Amino acid sequence: MPFFQSSSNPSILPPKSPFLAPRRASNPEIFDGHSNHDLTAISSTKSLQSDLDPSKYTTVEPEHKSNLMGCTANLITAIVGAGVIGIPYAFRETGLCAGWAFILLSAVMGCKSLRLLVETAKHVDAPSYETLSEAAFGRNGWILCNLNMFFMAWGPMLSYMMIVKDTLGRVLGYPEEDVAGQKMVLAVSSVLVMLPLSLQRDMADLAKTSRLSVLFDIFLVAIVAIFSPTSESIHDAGGIINLLSQSTFRPGTCFIGLGIISFAFSCQHSSLIIAGSLDNPTRERWSKVTLIALAACATLATFMGTFGYIGFLEYTEGDVLNNFPMLEDTNNSNDMITARAANIARGLLCCTMFFVYPLESFVARHVIMTNLFRGREAHEGDDHAVLDRWDRNSCR
């Protein structure tokens, strides 16, 4: 019998969705002083200890929550990731006008799917993506969803580390041939920045770094828009009208660009974790989060794709920053200014990789914990409660 199904045994309670009730409450005397907690909070805490030694005094600190803007910043950071630097290349494959349409389509469908996921989870009282899949497809759905979530997080985590190794190494002066130097840069930055952020207990703890990441993304897009040679390309094409007529829609390669754009807007695997970190999570507040986040991501992608593609047209590379000159390859003053701006953009890109990596690591850690630990909290994906438990004998 699936765990969510009702039973005649009153001791077996249905799981609680984060959109219906608090996931866990704290012991008010220890964590919250004399705040307005009631007996429900205490009994909620005691329910966690049902399978523990009652003689031991244990508590679970409440899950940290983020406000509306913090949750929105987390969602924007999870969506943008490294995909924004590939949007100009996607425009090259789809055509400029088709690229605009595909971005709008991806944003609308992404917003709808994020809301639909949470609404469906609320309807069946499922607290996580994998339990929602279990509600629909049983144990096999739970296993398949866990696998997909892990690989959807693990793949981007590897790509972020590769970007840091290649990009930050060159920014710091290590040539492309110096593989040992680039590996050292990756190792040091991973230990000093990415690892501490990934060790945070709750998704809400990353809201501040996600706000910084959104600012860095804005500056990155602004640098590409300002320093791309768009005026030269428009002049060589005979005007913006001629340029648009030459790059409206390219049916031969449009699906390549569509794949890049749609993947750049994918974040469904982390949606319920981010939604569960929202303070006072209601339908209206989650709708605001998705609307603001997807509108911001669509705006960033549109500006990056338009200016990046128009600047380099058929020479646009998969990473548009590779179209800009490196400092060691420049001679005149104009190219030097552009190269320095491009280096700043590369540094900003690495900073966003530092901040988006922990978001994906939370998803991978969530999957590992649901499979590594026993008990209702682990099965429901109640990560913070499992991490706070004093006993580790429940590990299989």
Image: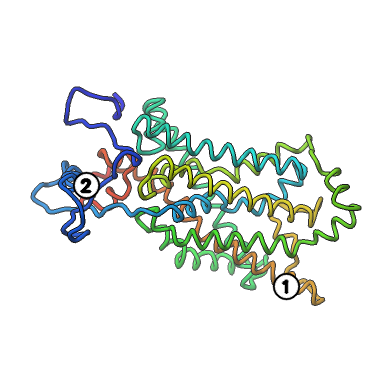
Amino acid, disc 2: Asn
Q: How far is mark 1 from mark 2, CA to CA?
A: 56 Å
Seen at 28% across and 48% down, the residue is: 386
Question: Quick check: 252 above or below 226?
Answer: above
Q: Residues within 10 Å of mark 1 (few under 14, many from 20)?
A: some
Q: Position of residue 206 (x, y in %)?
A: 43, 58
Which residue in the structure is indicated by mark 1?
327
Which residue in the structure is indicated by mark 2?
393
Amino acid, disc 1: Leu
Residue 275 relative to residue 322: left or right:
left
Instruction: Specify which label sits upstream in the sequence, 1 or 2.
Output: 1
Q: Position of residue 277 (x, y in %)?
A: 38, 49
Of residues 262 and 303, the one drawn nearer to the viewer in this rendering: 303
Seen at 48% across and 37% down, the residue is: 115
Q: Secondary structure at mark 1?
A: helix
Q: Position of residue 223 (x, y in %)?
A: 68, 64
Of residues 163 and 74, the one drawn nearer to the viewer in this rendering: 74
Q: Residues within 10 Å of mark 2 (few under 14, many from 20)?
A: few
Mark number displayed over residue 175: none
Seen at 71% across and 44% down, the residue is: 100
Residue 89 relative to residue 331: left or right:
left
Q: Position of residue 182 (x, y in %)?
A: 59, 66
Question: Quick check: 124 above or below 209?
Answer: above
Question: Quick check: 322 above or below 111?
Answer: below
Q: Secondary structure at mark 2?
A: loop
Seen at 31% across and 50% down, the residue is: 384
Label 1 vs label 2, nearer the camera: 1
